[in-house]
Amino acid sequence: MKKFIFSIIAAISIFWGAFAEESKNPPLSEDKPVSQPRISIFSTSTDWEGLTGLRYHEYKGKFVSSSSLIGRGLVLYYLDGFPCYGLGEGVRIWLGPNNKHEGELRIACLYAPEEIKFTWRNATREADQAESTGILICPVKSDGRELTIDLGNCDKGPDWSEYK
């Protein structure tokens, strides 16, 4: 009797596995267009500690806004890159005239970076997330866990339309 019950359970498992596989990957037909696969982006930063033997530390950034780049407002989004990645809400910063700002740069790094990159665009404080203009490459000075980014020393990289 035990062999009979085990045989039924095994048969059901095999049938269910085949059915589940067929529903995940239905056969292609000529009537249905083939859809493009979705692109998933997974951070490679999650195992940097294991790969390097170094430990993450949180760094906060402050900006010296001595640049004509700010205009009526400048929206920056931090771009992840070794040795750092952005922390949650700490990747969007708005800098405005008269030293006004909203948000703060918060990043986790294996060591203090010497250069960081942002996407940038000119916009007012309340502007929703929209397409940015291009890349901004900025040298960084560090004092412990405090990073200083002087916008006057940043270089504008190519606009996104220039990338191929």
Image (cartoon, helix red, strand yellow):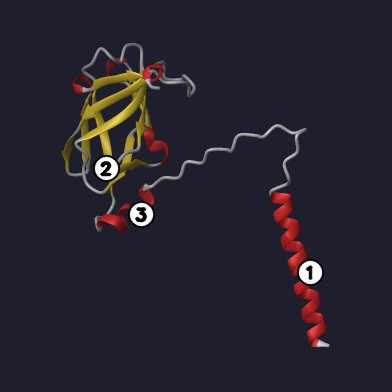
How far is the residue under mark 1 from the one under mark 3?
A: 40 Å
- Left or right of residue 62: residue 120: right
Is 135 located above or below residue 105 in the figure? above
Which label is found at residue 47?
A: 3
Q: Determine the secondary structure under disc 2.
A: strand
Pick whichever, 17 or 115, lies toward us.
17
Q: Total marks drawn?
A: 3
Image coordinates for residue 148, horizontal then vertical, percent: 20, 32
Tell me whether the residue at label 2 lies in contact with that at label 3, contact meaning CB atoms closer than 8 angstroms: no
Is 146 located above or below residue 121 in the figure? below
> N-terminal of the two: label 1 or label 3?
1
Pick whichever, 22 or 112, lies toward us.
22
The residue positioned 53% from the left and 38% from the top of the image is 39
Q: Look at label 2 and name its amino acid.
A: Tyr
Is 24 located above or below residue 29 in the figure? below
Pick whichever, 35 or 48, lies toward us.
35
Q: Determine the secondary structure under disc 1.
A: helix
The residue positioned 29% from the left and 51% from the top of the image is 56
For disc 3, the neighbor class at 10 Å (few under 14, some 14 to 19, many from 20) is few
Which label is found at residue 59?
A: 2
> N-terminal of the two: label 2 or label 3?
3
Q: Nearer the viewer, mark 1 or mark 3?
A: 1
- Left or right of residue 39: residue 67: left
Quadrant of residue 19 in the image? bottom right
How far is the residue under mark 2 from the one under mark 1?
A: 55 Å
Q: Look at label 3 and name its amino acid.
A: Asp
Q: What residue is pinned by disc 1? A: 12
Q: Look at label 1 and name its amino acid.
A: Ile
The residue positioned 22% from the left and 39% from the top of the image is 113
> N-terminal of the two: label 2 or label 1?
1
Which label is found at residue 78?
A: none
